[in-house]
Amino acid sequence: MTTLDPHRLDAEDPLKWARDEFEIPLRSDSGGEGQDDVVYLCGNSLGLLPKRARTLMIEEIDVWSKRAVYGHFAHPHNRPWKNIDECVVPGLAKVVGAKESEIAHTSTLTSNIHSLFVSFYRPTKTRWRILIEKGAFPSDWYAIHSHPKLHEDILSPEQIDNAVVALTPRDGEETLHTEDILASIQKYGDEIAVVWLSGVQYYTGQYFDVPPICKKSHEVGAYFGLDLAHAVGNVPLELSNWGVDFAAWCTYKYLNSGPGAVAGYYIKDGLNDGGRRLAGWWGQNRETRFQMSPVFDPIPGAAGYQHSNPPVFSSIPLIAHLDILERAGGMEALRQKSLQLTGYLWELLTASSFYVSTSETETINKSGQIGFRILTPSSPSARGCQLSIMILPQGSHTMEKVFDHMVKRGVVGDERRPDVIRLSPVPLYNRFVDVQTAVKVLEASLQAVKDEHGI
């Protein structure tokens, strides 16, 4: 068992002030028992409400009430609605490591993925494949598979059926090896039009080594794109320096902007869309946008791909988050604490009597004993905040029972049926003592289920 003292670590934490910037749910409001704060380790699914976001939202409602349409142009808090995206683009550019001209704050994640693929997946009879990880988030999987079918004038039925190449882990493993991804890119070579990966894999929590994969994609003449839903605000990103061609993200996980909040995307400066673009009026030259010209004159860069004005109310919490992030010292400061926080979680989990190594999994499954193993890579450089644990035995509904016990005891994680619980200590609002409590509750919950079934 680790000798680290969580109370000392919290006392020495330079970011300990940030927790008070957020509204922490109570156990009784989250399906648990008691009036204490929950241990919230679910920021990978939905981040918590920044306190300042409540203030800013009320201000916006008052502007709507008192100024109505004039809030678009004459805003008492200097956030005119017609320029609301410009209030967050500078901060977002820092988060993703890009130029402001390369990003846009708009629409939703999957809609942005579709827009990117309309412009940059331009298959030919010889370059037509898309590489994507087999375990990609379903929305990506569905979206990517839909695009070859839009090119029936170019691709044969056989090509359409085989356009998407699934990158599959090695037998008995859940995560991908960088060398295997590079080998697949080499194998399909100049048949590849786009390589599309997650920055951080939603299910396993794997943080991909982007630079060599991006470089290899370009060597074979393919575009390289990223879904950053679980990476943005979680790990440091350098999209411009890495040479990434395009990317998309949501803002309601580690950017704490609220459920279903407006998303964003990145397009490398100078990337040629081949004349294919889904145009909209918010992509029109800002100087002439309200002249309602019939001629589309796009804003240079990523902003020229916007469709409609971004929702104001779901943009406002992001302003609050970006302010906290700036005061915290940016993504590098968050990453330093995240490595410690998730590293501490790893230490406690692997020291548990319920912990099972990968090699022991089959034995545990056959015996019916209760335990867990970790799917997320052991190397800190290959993961972000999240650790994904598989509850054993698999396929027994044990996970759901353990998860329910954890909720009742005040720990909110994230369940992924049939067998996985994801735990994500977020450096802005989680403490080391939260991590310690979560592991104790996990162990107590596993023991409770074990006792209930007389194992």
Image (spheres, helix red, strand yellow):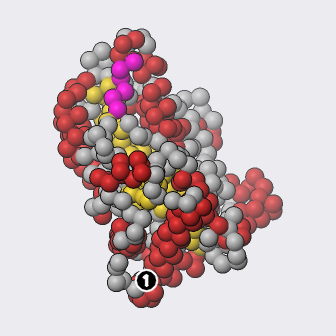
Q: Residues within 10 Å of mark 1 (few under 14, many from 20)?
A: some
* Residue 288 visible at all: no
In-front residue for pair 353/304: 353
At 77% from the left and 58% from the top, the residue drawn is 64
Specify the farthest residue to the right: 65
In-front residue for pair 418/82: 418
Q: Position of residue 419 (x, y in %)?
A: 49, 49
77 vs 171, left or right, is right
For the record, the magenta segment spans: 161-166
- Image quarter for residue 341? bottom left
* Residue 404 visible at all: yes
Residue that badge 1 annotates: 6
Looking at the image, residue 94 lies above or below residue 13:
above
At 69% from the left and 72% from the top, the residue drawn is 33
Q: Position of residue 315 (x, y in %)?
A: 60, 57
Determine the secondary structure under disc 1: helix
Looking at the image, residue 19 lies above or below residue 385:
below
Q: Position of residue 445 (x, y in %)?
A: 55, 66
Is residue 37 on the magenta stretch? no
At 19% from the left and 36% from the top, the residue drawn is 183
In-front residue for pair 370/262: 370
Looking at the image, residue 26 lies above or below residue 168:
below
Amino acid of disc 1:
Pro
Q: Position of residue 239 (x, y in %)?
A: 33, 51
At 57% from the left and 58% from the top, the residue drawn is 453
Q: Count every numbered label the image shows and give the total.
A: 1
Specify the farthest residue to the front: 454
Which image quarter holds the N terminus?
Answer: bottom left
- Image quarter for residue 346? bottom left
